[in-house]
Image (cartoon, helix red, strand yellow):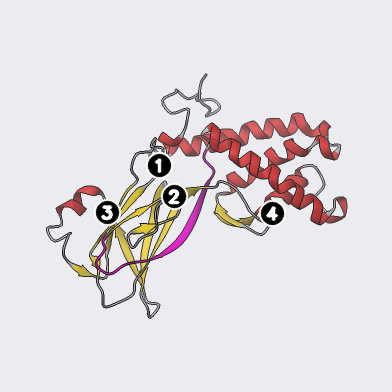
Amino acid sequence: MALYTAQDIIVGGLQELGLGRAENYDTTNDLQNNLPKLNKIIAQYSVDGLLIQQTLDEGFILTGGVGIYTIGLGQTPGPSVFNTSRPWKIESAYIVDSFNNHYPITLIPREPYQNEVDVQISQSRPTQLFYDIGLTDATSEIGTIKLYLIPDFAEQYTLHIVSIKELTRFVALTDTVYFDEMYMNLLEVKLAIKIARMYGKGALLPELRIQDTINEGIVYKQNWRDISLAPKLKNWGRTMNIYNSMPNN
């Protein structure tokens, strides 16, 4: 896992074409003009069901007396709403108080949460979190975060969630993404294929397409390993080719 910018990916794509040195291209125009092309590649992978996973650390101010929060885009703002894209998976969580003290939160499954006899009444600093992702095939993608204990009124708490989400697009060249190197390799080569002829590098396409097939196989294999993400794949339910890790037709 590493931190990259959109510019890093575009420069990587140019390097795949042998144009990695700044003197080989117009730095400002080439980078900016290739940003929409990169976004189209990311959008197409989302449509095809191939998940470009990024890891985000997001903070949300908790409301005293509120222990259940919905998380997802398009919600009406309110004290129990986290208006951000729904995570596929929460990796870890922690609480930060008004004195900047950090406290870890234990992620628990549904049953232990439901078995807490005082789950609806006890208030203090939250120590446990249950995440219900909701329906993966629903039109409105809303998950639910349930905390134990319920935040009290004596302190201002901020809940930080470290989660896996889908990368959908970059707005600026300086936008950052934290993800696995395999996604960097995938996007660099795919962008190089898209712009090769524009830079007079069409002769490199056969070699790039071979590498692209290898990269896609690695990413498909990784996505299929995580059963919690598998329902997002449009190829869900199809058998896999054991030789190239791709879905069979």
Question: Which of the two discs, 2 and 3, labels the residue nearer the N terminus?
Answer: 2
Tell me how far mark 4 sits from mark 1, CA to CA.
Answer: 33 Å
- Residue marked by disc 1: 140
Residue at (62, 47) in percent of width and height: 184
Amino acid type for the residue under numbered disc 3: Ile
Pointer 4 with pointer 3, Cβ within 8 A: no
Residue that sits furthest to the bottom in the current view: 99
- Residue marked by disc 3: 108
Q: Nearer the viewer, mark 1 or mark 3?
A: 1
Tell me how far mark 1 sits from mark 2, CA to CA.
Answer: 8 Å
In the image, the segment drawn in magenta is 51-67
Relative vertical location of residue 220 with respect to residue 158 in this rendering, above or below: above
Disc 2 is placed on an element classified as: loop
**Mark 2, other Cα within 10 Å: few <14 / some 14–19 / many ≥20:** few
Left or right: where 150 falls relative to 136: left
Answer whether residue 188 is visible to the viewer in this image.
no
Tell me how far mark 2 sits from mark 3, CA to CA.
Answer: 27 Å
State the image quarter where residue 228 is shown.
top left
Disc 3 is placed on an element classified as: loop
Image mark for residue 74: 2
Disc 1 is placed on an element classified as: loop
Tell me how far mark 4 sits from mark 3, CA to CA.
Answer: 37 Å
Q: Nearer the viewer, mark 2 or mark 3?
A: 2
**Mark 1, other Cα within 10 Å: few <14 / some 14–19 / many ≥20:** some
Decide which of 176, 82 is in the foreground and name it.
82
Pointer 1 with pointer 2, Cβ within 8 A: yes
- Residue marked by disc 4: 8
Q: Position of residue 14 (x, y in %)?
A: 77, 46
Residue 82 among magenta residues:
no
Relative vertical location of residue 126 with respect to residue 144 in this rendering, above or below: below
Disc 4 is placed on an element classified as: helix
